[in-house]
Amino acid sequence: MAIQLKDVHFAYPETPDNDILHIANWSLSTGEQVFVHGPSGGGKSTLLNLLSGMLTATSGEVNVLGERLETMGARQRDRFRANHIGYIFQQFNLIPYIDAIDNIQLAHQFANKNPQPVLIDEIKSLLSTFHIPQADWHNPVAKLSIGQQQRIAIARALINRPQLLIADEPTSSLDQKNRDNFMSTLMSLVSEHGISLLFVSHDMSLASYFDRIDALSEINAAGEGS
Ligand code: ADP
């Protein structure tokens, strides 16, 4: 299993009586791709933060890639995330004033104490896969197009060969053409490498890329009096 949640409750510490999430049972198989949709404010980011170990459940089991996140300390969870989970954010979160190669290299350094000599070759090969012209490899990423920046963000998420990829509204700043390109590139890469993908969005037009589509309202019983 890539993800298994059992009787998970989560409330923010400031509002302990207000469960944002109550998930009785939900899982994602290894190598499976799921599209989870829900309206803004429905708890999507909260769920992703629990799964990547940024937040800890109030109670219940959060099992990710066979590890129980709620039993780990904060440092262990940071390391686990860096080593095993790739994350693509809405706003890319690239460092704007450094180039594509350095942005990807930094993500690798978070996970590995000793940089490997083959790394630069791997980064260059990823950038080529994502059709980033060689002339742009050494430009600050802020100077590249939004579509290119988003492709660099996928390359960065893949450099540590994650078993699980989490995407949080990654297409919201892309136009239609870039969105289609981004989705086809992402979907073919995850199938090719057998990566489990949890893709979260409110944009139902993206659901057609997925075989499995879950509504957060069906997964999450919080707010229904349970
Ligand atoms: P989504 O990602 O679906 O828009 P969120 O997970 O961001 O939803 O938010 C779910 C609910 O949790 C919202 O009601 C929001 O106000 C609340 N919330 C989010 N972050 C915090 C926080 N740090 N402290 C308290 N409440 C929060």
Image (cartoon, rainbow, N blue to C red):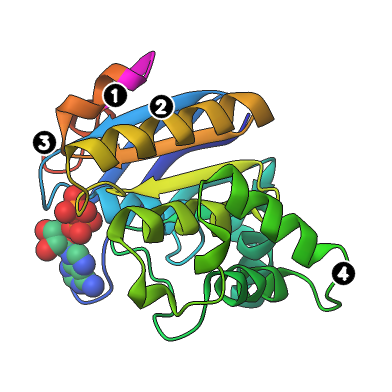
Q: Amino acid at mark 1?
A: Asp
CA separation, marks 1 and 3?
A: 18 Å
The residue at the point 63 percent across, 29 percent down is 1
Are the two marked residues, 4 and 1, in contact with CB atoms closer than 8 angstroms?
no
**Marks 4 and 3, the one that precedes in the sequence:** 4
The residue at the point 38 percent across, 70 percent down is 93
First to last magenta residue range: 209-214
**Marks 2 and 4, the one that precedes in the sequence:** 2
**Marks 4 and 1, the one that precedes in the sequence:** 4
Are the two marked residues, 2 and 1, in contact with CB atoms closer than 8 angstroms?
yes
Q: Nearer the viewer, residue 122 or 203?
A: 122
Q: Amino acid at mark 4?
A: Gln
Q: Nearer the viewer, residue 125 or 216?
A: 125
**Marks 2 and 3, the one that precedes in the sequence:** 2
Residue 116's mark? Answer: 4
Identify whether 33 is placed above or below 208. below
Q: Is residue 178 left or right of residue 117?
A: left
Ligand 1 contact, mark 4 (Cβ < 8 Å): no
